[in-house]
Image (tube, rainbow, N blue to C red):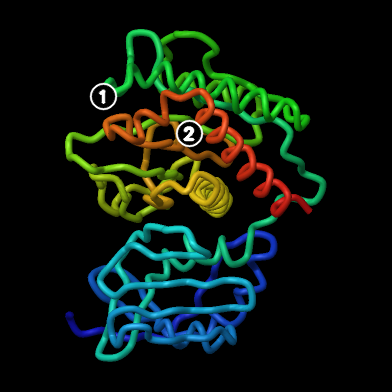
Amino acid sequence: MKRFFPCLLLLALLLGGAAGRAQAPLESLERLQAFGREYIRAQDWTEANKFQFKWTRKDEEFLVTTRKSTLLFTVDSRRAVINGVAVWLSAPIARANTTALISLTDLKTAILPILYPPKLREGQRIKTVCLDPGHGGKDAGNMDGVGMEKTHTLALAREVERLLRELGYKVVMTRSSDKFLELEERAELARRKTADLFVSLHFNASSSPGVRGIETYCLTPARASSTNVRQEGSSVGMLPGNQFDHLNLFLAHQVQKSMVHTLSAEDRGVKRARFAVLKNVGSPAILVEGGFMSDPHEGKRIADRDYCKQLARAIVAGITTYRRLVER
């Protein structure tokens, strides 16, 4: 690893609500610069917050424990596990000699929003959810194994809609039939209906055998690298959806956690991407990939009506938990 050049700077974490409680201890922590990124020592951060730090594999893997949370990190990896759910970081965990280093961007936009759930403004309530069944019309989506993705996303959306309405939510659907919509139209509809949340529903496919599992995306933070294979790099600046970065991540984590734990599905993690439907939405937004149609076992589940209901219940449970934790 290249040499690190430390410099003492103030760190201003622009986190809303309860996350502000973590701000003061970070202000005096030393920043380390490498590879065009800023890091802090994991041990400095944990000591400042009275967390427990432990190497579980010497110089390779370490565990951070707080009163309510557990976080597992691996050196040279972007994959972390926070409260039992995989979360993909924007930059790998680094190491300088025996010191573990965490990217400041990931601390601000991936780790702290989970440890300290962001809060909505006083009196703000989550009333309207916009559901976006992926694809439709001439855009069939994936067609591997069990029919067309557009059919399965609409069936799932209808079940999620039913459950949300039973709980008193108002629901807006970007499409309620086999209709084609441009990606920009979907975000525009959510803005026009002043939705409080936007949830886009999809299913995956892969040409590689044995690939399966559930993943949830939210928008990549400004000037950070995306998780998806089309990684745009770190040159993209602020997009409209980035004003909700902390809420986006927290919503994605709650929904992913609910799906993985309820369905006993393989956890592919919370990921970040600059998908068109996430960039310009005027509310916290996520994109759910509910499994791989191309996998024989998972494809069979996706096509099963009872499993569709289970998946819908898990998504709704994640949304409900999110609402309970962010409303004041």
Q: Is residue 243 visible?
A: no
Tell me which residue sits at (41%, 11%) in the image. Answer: 180
- Image coordinates of residue 56 in percent, x first then y, are 37, 83
Does residue 230 show up?
Answer: yes
| Upstream in sequence: badge 2 or badge 1 | 1
- Quarter in which the N terminus is drawn: bottom left
Q: Say what amino acid the circle numbered 2 marks.
A: Asn
Mark 2, residues whose alpha carbon is within 10 Å: few (<14), some, or many (≥20)? many
Crowding at label 1, few (<14), some or many (≥20) Cα neighbours within 10 Å? Answer: some
- The residue closer to the viewer here, 131 or 151, is 151
- What residue did someone put label 1 on? 144
Image: 16 above or below 319: below
Q: Nearer the viewer, residue 8 or 121?
A: 121
Which residue sits at x=59%, y=62%?
15
Q: Nearer the viewer, mark 2 or mark 1?
A: 1
Residue at the (52%, 86%) spot, across then down: 52
Q: Are marks 2 and 1 in contact (CB under 8 Å)?
A: no
Q: Secondary structure at mark 1?
A: loop
Question: Quick one: which residue is furthest to the right in this view?
Answer: 123
What residue did someone put label 2 on? Answer: 280
Instruction: Give percent across and percent down for residue 184.
Output: 43, 23
In screen coordinates, is 206 left or right of 16? left
Secondary structure found at label 2: loop
Q: Position of residue 306 (x, y in %)?
A: 54, 27
Residue 170 coordinates in the image, percent (x, y) = 72, 25
Q: Is residue 269 above or below residue 67?
A: above
Q: From this view, report whether residue 288 is shown above or below residue 123.
A: above
